[in-house]
Image (spheres, rainbow, N blue to C red):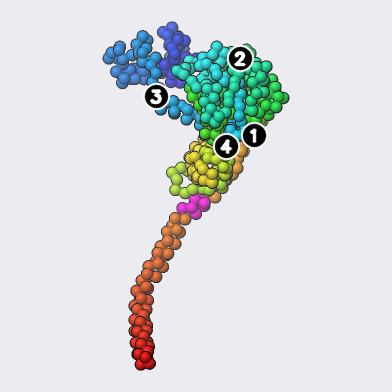
Amino acid sequence: ANYKTSKSVLAGLDQEMPGIEGSFTLKTMSKFYEDPMERAAYKKAVDIATQRILATIYRMRLDESADTSCDPPRCISERLSDQRSPQHRERAAEAATKSVVLLQNDGILPFNRSVVKKLAVVGMAANAPIVDPFYYAYMGGGSGTVFPGSVVTPLQGITKRAAKEGIEVISAVTFDIPQVLQVALEADVVIVVDAVSSTEGLDRDSEVAPRHLANNLQTLAGAELYRTLHEARRRVVVLLQTPGAVLMPWRRSVNAALNLFLAGEETGTAWANILFGDVSPEGKLPIMFPDTAEDAIKPNPAPSFAYEEGLFTSYRNPLAKAAFPFGHGLSYTSFGYGSPELKAGCSAKICVGLRVSNTGSRKGREVAQVYFQFPTMSKVPSKLLRGFKKTALLAPGESEELTFAFSERDLSTFTDGAWSAWDGIVARFGASSMDLRQELVLDGKKVAAALAAEAAKPAETELAESEKQADKTDAEAAKPAETEVAEPEKQVGKKGAEKKTRLRKARIAKHS
């Protein structure tokens, strides 16, 4: 979005997209030169922008033939062709599955065929078309929208996978409470597929109605639906398809809730992979889900408005209460965190090793995170994400050491227009911004001493190994001498035994 063309050009804007706003017409650009004080700066900026555009045209040889252009009506057939392959679909399904975030689970997931015989899948988003007049369930709206050629809907994906387990699936593709309740009472578990969409040019607010394109913090299903199912003593699993944070005032009324940020054509496959335990959830929230609307920054409809929160947003705001914190995401297994230790010999300013172990009973991956607490005088939030690492797929009992490398920039903050390096930083490691398990103080002198001691370990080990080898060599050298002494004794003993045998035989012959 181009707010003011003149300032955008000075800041380096070369081209307006999609090119329908008229920002670069001769009439508009002539205004650049009206102020004599800024005329030279604008002329230089326009010349540089022009040079960059022409350089690209010449480099791509677009000036040599008009046929190289893909402007309509050229390239229509190419644009309409399906370039997807089975491998593309597999990668899409893999990416979507890894993106599922398990928000809460009382043990109902993954589904067990010995417990669940019939599933009810309900909700408008359960079998939503690719394009709906009120919302998009698989992608965001606006000029960047890409419509998939086909999709696996949640209902399709769940039904196909349930059939392999011999589980029956019934459905009600609606949020009409009487209809939902009718099928819900027949099932062991109710899956509510809830959604919200977003588009450009509009802020997502908690008070938008009607929910056209659902630019809203509220999901399509109202709290009354969840309350009704809870009162009917139904076990409920909620699948959320969202473009960002949503409000979940009903979350304590359901058994499990999962979120998938608009994942495209393999959405239904991803849900099925997680619900039936084919893959353990490994997604983490890259944002905070607020507890109430008051815990989110309320948009202002004014054309120009100053947001003065600075860095103090989301998990960095100590006053904001989270329903689910930044970095949160559960698994079907559990993970333990070892004590972080400084590591020598890395190319970064400081490296820290952290061992993560699978302490549960299923395979899974963990995303370990580290948050820095800088000294108070740094004027930054008391908790800042400074790194994250995902483990390999760990079997129960397996572990992996993750290495976090911190640069000089990581150990610094930017305030009052300058970077400042700090000492005494507290590094906290854990599974989310609110689930921090271990910490290590990065004190300059202690770090230097620890790294020196760590660096000395190889030398000490080498010395010990050398001494061990020397002892072994001495022992080997002594063996020939011992053998030389023992061999004559052995020969003497052998001759004595032969003499005794001859005498015994002679006595026996004499008496016979």
Question: Which residue, as the protein is rendered here, is positioned at the far right?
Answer: 231
Query: Circle 3 is placed at which residue position?
Result: 85
Image vertical order of residue 243 relative to residue 437, above or below: above
Q: Is residue 388 left or right of residue 118?
A: left
**Which is nearer the N-term, disc 3 or disc 2?**
3
Q: Which residue is mark 4?
A: 332
Whichever of labels 1 and 4 marks the residue nearer the N terminus, that label is 1
Marking on residue 106: 1
| Type of secondary structure dominating the magenta stretch | helix
* Outermost residue, bottom side: 510
Q: Amino acid at mark 2?
A: Arg
* Element at label 4: loop
Measured Cα–Cα span from mark 1 to mark 4: 11 Å
Q: Give the residue type that dot 3 points to.
A: Ser
Q: Which residue is mark 2?
A: 211
Q: Which residues are magenta?
A: 448-456
Q: Residue at x 61, y 16 (%)?
A: 174
Q: Nearer the viewer, mark 2 or mark 4?
A: 4
Q: Secondary structure at mark 2?
A: loop
**Residue in the image at 46% along x and 42% along y:** 348
Of the image marks 3 and 1, the number of the one nearer the N terminus: 3
Residue 454 rendering spot, x and y as whole percentages: 48, 52
Give how far across and how far down residue 105 sits, in percent: 62, 33
Q: Position of residue 337 (x, y in %)?
A: 57, 44
Q: Is residue 3 above or below residue 390?
A: above
